[in-house]
Amino acid sequence: MNKFLDIKGDERGIFVEVFKIPGVGQASYSTTKRRGIVRGNHYHTHKIELFCVIEGEAKIRLRNRADNEIREYIVSGEKPELVEMIPNWTHNIENVGEGEMKLLIWANEVFDPQNPDTFAEVV
């Protein structure tokens, strides 16, 4: 079986939803073309995401909407690590490297366009 995936792209890069398994979650990937481009700036009320930069360098920022605590992580594909996007923490990711940044994303639920659980808010 072959299934072509929908590639959503803009001037920042691309986003592709790869695996969607109800009860297990969803895996996606994105690219961010160049230094200084920020993606995200939103929060989820119940969705949990794990980010893993697999190529390039990034700064991941999270802000607790309850008390404005900010957490910041500098991550790299040279030493991959998982960073959890916590519900009700607004988050973003910025390419801080010299080239394209590639990111793997896992979410604990499959994206539902009828109930996206994604709310825009700057970190």
Image (cartoon, rainbow, N blue to C red):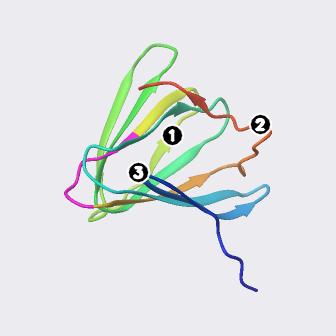
Residue depicted at 76% across the width and 45% down the height = 112
Cα distance in 3D space between marks 3 and 1: 24 Å
For marks 3 and 1, give the one nearer the viewer.
3
Question: In the image, is residue 55 above or below residue 39?
Answer: below
- Label 3: element kind: loop
Q: Are marks 3 and 2 in contact (CB under 8 Å)?
A: no
Q: Quadrant of the N terminus?
A: bottom right
* 14 inside magenta stretch: no
Position in image of residue 27 (x %, y %): 60, 60
For marks 2 and 1, give the one nearer the viewer.
2
Cα distance in 3D space between marks 3 and 2: 26 Å
| Residue designated by label 2 | 115
Please state the extent of the stretch shown in magenta in the rendering: 93-99
Residue depicted at 31% across the width and 63% down the height = 77
Cα distance in 3D space between marks 2 and 1: 18 Å
What is the three-letter code of the residue carrying label 2? Asn
> Taking 106 as reference, is 26 left or right?
right
Front one among 18 and 21 = 18
Position in image of residue 41 (x %, y %): 46, 32
For marks 3 and 2, give the one nearer the viewer.
3
| Residue located farthest toward the top when viewing the structure as drawn | 67
N-terminal of the two: label 3 or label 1? 3
Question: In the image, is residue 20 above or below residue 113?
Answer: below
What is the three-letter code of the residue carrying label 3? Glu
> Are there few (<14), some (14-19), or many (20+) residues within 10 Å of tag 1?
many
| Residue located farthest toward the front when viewing the structure as drawn | 11
